[in-house]
Image (cartoon, helix red, strand yellow):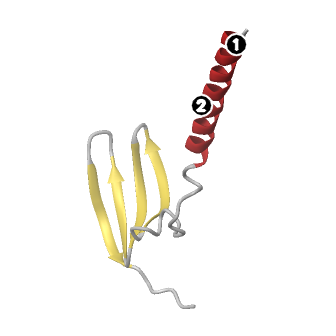
Amino acid sequence: MDIYFGALKMVLALAVIVFAAIIFYRYMGKWRLNLAPRNQRYGLQKVETIHLGYRKFVSVIEVKNRVLVIGVGEKEMALLTEWKSEEKES
């Protein structure tokens, strides 16, 4: 009888550990210590993306104080234009 209770305790302990690992993995992105939003960490923000066809699109990206327009194809990427972004007044 002691063998069955010992095996049952071991299986339950293993189930609790696996359940805790799954919960931790699922919510670890929300439990970050840095409170800055993901996009603002590097000063990079996607403004808009337009899909032109299969694996082809044009994307507008803000990088700190610059705005970049990037064209992306199936095997290539090109900077189409860039300009200084306007300062936002508060």
**Which label was assigned to residue 24?**
none
Residue placed farthest to the bottom in the image?
90
Viewer-proximal residue among 62 and 75? 62
Task: Tell me if 69 is positioned left or right of 19 in this view.
Answer: left
Amino acid type, label 2: Val
Amino acid type, label 1: Asp
Circle 1 sits on which residue? 2
The residue shown at (47%, 69%) is 40
Above or below, 62 against 26 in this view is below
Q: CA distance from mark 2 to mark 1?
A: 24 Å
- Looking at marks 2 and 1 on the same chain, the residue that comes earlier in the sequence is marked by 1
**Which label was assigned to residue 18?**
2
Q: Quadrant of the N terminus?
A: top right
Tell me where residue 85 appears, x and y as whole percent. Answer: 41, 80
Tell me where residue 65 appears, x and y as whole percent. Answer: 37, 79
Q: Quadrant of the C terminus?
A: bottom right
